[in-house]
């Protein structure tokens, strides 16, 4: 990677050791993707129960199950990415609270506890009132659980591309994007939501997709004007960089296609198009997250 | 006491004696390095020169690796060294993501993070780091940067204006200084690092864990 080099200088590394390649790879992508879904469906259930309490009631149990499944996927991929898997307990017994990883571990544990309380309320006690009370606190806790990965990326001082204000917005948008998409996909089987509720989910999906796309484009265009390392990293997704195709496939699949399809669905009053938009968003989000995770790691730090 | 390191790049001749001494002293496994010397060739024939830059942990005063470590495996000791407890490390690689100097790696034998400790075990026995002892031209100067009478403090004072750290914009306040450095030697973005066979060896990136 040559960024600051001058033709006149012609500086070339002629002897160096082999450097570590990508350290956080697809396992961490799975971690972020699954967490977005696990917390996103909780946000959506909270919204639906407030606005459409009668029809959304049938979603209490299935959403709880989906959230538990995806949060455990997130935890599974978190743990298997550790090089010392069986020392995971060190985080709880030797926590270092300046670390987003340590704080996030406690937050995620609390979130899992609340999810099981939700399952207890709806599956064992069959108590909707208790469920809704616990759901309020689960929704509140879902916000920092979603955000802590952004804090971790911000603490990764070496990776200039990952900036905290942008990453936190992207994490929340990823949760609302994937949460609304998964609710729309679930409705294919449950078929309980009214057209108005589905339209609301579609609008949230489209708004999240558009906002996230604008943020990525803003970083792509203006990031290089602020920092040389950002410019060097973004060269991997521009001008024939090795991740350029993957980057644009992700942007189109996760954001542009869902936004266009939701717009078409609302204009034509066709609910089936929403399912296609949802499927595209969920698949595309993985690709978007993966590219953004990997490209800063391609840059030599020394 | 705050221990610091200074390398006079005017003196370094790229013999890699420090690299080998470090490897032997700390039993650093194959494919991994606590300290390495990078060669960068500058210019166009016949106006060319070769630069040598020893690269190791900077033992930052505001160390991002220490901050991000979830279990305090990376921690400060009283003399300012950022040390590592390999028994506590969980191998999350957060420190690798955080270190702006690429100084941390996963030890393929222990599957934990590892890096230069300024030979903390030798210092505890009042000995100099192995790389300092091995250097044939005394390009490595090590000592207490809070003591104005120490060799390193005197050297910094004598070369005032020519003392630099790597990536000062990161705000890490490194305790590792260079005399005679420049953009090409200290900024990795200022030189071309092609993958593949070069003059001396094959330059490449390793998969996770540093295994071939």
Image (cartoon, grey):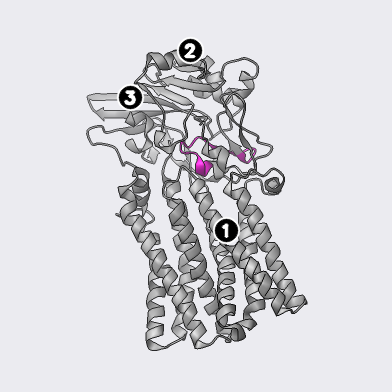
Element class at badge 3: strand
Which residue is painted at 29% across and 24% down in the image?
B49
Q: Chain of mark 3?
A: B
Q: Viewer-nearest of labels 1 and 2?
A: 1
Q: CA distance from mark 3 to mark 2?
A: 28 Å
> On screen, A167 above or below A187?
above
Q: CA distance from mark 3 to mark 1?
A: 51 Å
Between residues B200 and A144, which one lies in front from this camera angle?
A: A144
Image position, residue B160 (x, y; %): 37, 18
Image position, residue A162 (x, y; %): 44, 51
> On screen, B68 above or below B149?
below
Q: Residues within 10 Å of mark 2 (few under 14, many from 20)?
A: some
Q: Viewer-nearest of labels 3 and 2?
A: 2
Q: Are marks 3 and 1 in contact (CB under 8 Å)?
A: no
Q: Are marks 3 and 1 on the same chain?
A: no
Q: Are marks 1 and 2 on the same chain?
A: no
Residue occupied by mark 1: A144
> On screen, B19 above or below B114?
above
The dot on residue B50 is 3
Question: How many marks overall?
Answer: 3
The reply to whether the magenta stretch includes residue B103 is yes
Q: Chain of mark 1?
A: A
Asked which quadrant contains residue B107, the reply is: top right
Span shown in magenta: B96-112
> On screen, A121 above or below B151?
below
Q: Residues within 10 Å of mark 3 (few under 14, many from 20)?
A: some
Residue occupied by mark 2: B151
Q: CA distance from mark 1 to mark 2?
A: 49 Å
Between residues B55 and A14, which one lies in front from this camera angle?
A: B55
Which residue is painted at 61% across and 57% down in the image?
A77
């Amino acid at each position: 990677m040559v960024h600051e080099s001058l033709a006149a200088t012609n500086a070339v590394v002629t002897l160096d050791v082999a450097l570590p390649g990508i350290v956080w790879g697809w396992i961490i992508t799975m971690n972020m993707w699954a967490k977005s879904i696990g917390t996103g469906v909780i946000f959506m259930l909270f919204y639906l129960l407030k606005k459409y309490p009668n029809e959304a009631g049938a979603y209490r149990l299935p959403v709880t199950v989906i959230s538990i499944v995806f949060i455990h996927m997130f935890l599974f991929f978190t743990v298997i990415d550790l090089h010392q898997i069986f020392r995971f307990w060190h985080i709880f017994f030797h926590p270092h609270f300046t670390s987003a990883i340590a704080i996030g571990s406690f937050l995620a544990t609390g979130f899992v506890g609340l999810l099981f309380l939700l399952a207890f309320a709806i599956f064992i006690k069959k108590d909707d009132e208790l469920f809704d009370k616990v759901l309020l606190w689960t929704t509140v806790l879902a916000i920092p659980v979603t955000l802590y990965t952004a804090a971790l990326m911000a603490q990764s001082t070496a990776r200039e591309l990952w900036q905290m204000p942008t990453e936190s917005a992207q994490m929340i948008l990823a949760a609302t994007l994937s949460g609304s998409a998964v609710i729309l996909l679930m409705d294919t089987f449950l078929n309980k939501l009214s057209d108005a509720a589905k339209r609301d989910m579609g609008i949230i999906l489209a708004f999240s997709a558009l906002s996230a796309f604008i943020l990525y484009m803003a970083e792509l265009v203006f990031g290089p004007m602020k920092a040389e390392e950002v410019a060097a990293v973004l060269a991997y997704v521009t001008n024939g960089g090795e991740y350029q195709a993957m980057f644009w496939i992700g942007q189109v699949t996760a954001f542009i296609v869902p936004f266009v399809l939701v717009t078409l669905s609302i204009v034509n009053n066709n609910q089936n198009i929403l399912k296609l938009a949802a499927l595209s968003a969920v698949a595309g989000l993985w690709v978007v997250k993966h590219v953004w995770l990997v490209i800063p790691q391609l840059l030599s730090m020394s | 006491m705050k221990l610091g390191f200074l390398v006079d790049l005017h003196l370094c001749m790229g013999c890699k004696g420090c690299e080998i001494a470090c490897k032997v002293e700390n039993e650093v496994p194959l494919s991994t390095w606590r300290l390495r010397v990078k060669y960068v060739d500058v210019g166009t024939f016949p106006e060319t020169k070769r630069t040598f830059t020893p690269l190791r942990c900077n033992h930052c005063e505001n160390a991002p690796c220490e901050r991000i470590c979830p279990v305090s495996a990376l921690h400060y000791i009283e003399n300012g060294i950022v040390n590592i407890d390999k028994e506590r490390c969980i191998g999350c690689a957060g420190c690798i993501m955080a270190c702006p100097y690429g100084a941390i790696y996963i030890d393929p034998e222990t599957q934990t993070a590892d890096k230069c400790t300024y030979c903390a075990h030798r210092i505890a026995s009042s000995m100099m780091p192995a790389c300092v002892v091995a250097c044939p031209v005394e390009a490595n100067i090590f000592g207490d940067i809070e003591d104005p009478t120490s060799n390193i403090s005197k050297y910094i004072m004598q070369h005032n204006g020519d003392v630099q750290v790597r990536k000062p914009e990161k705000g890490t306040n490194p305790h590792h200084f260079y005399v005679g450095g420049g953009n090409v030697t200290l900024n990795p973005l200022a030189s071309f690092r092609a993958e593949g066979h070069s003059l001396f060896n094959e330059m490449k990136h390793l998969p996770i864990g540093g295994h071939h």
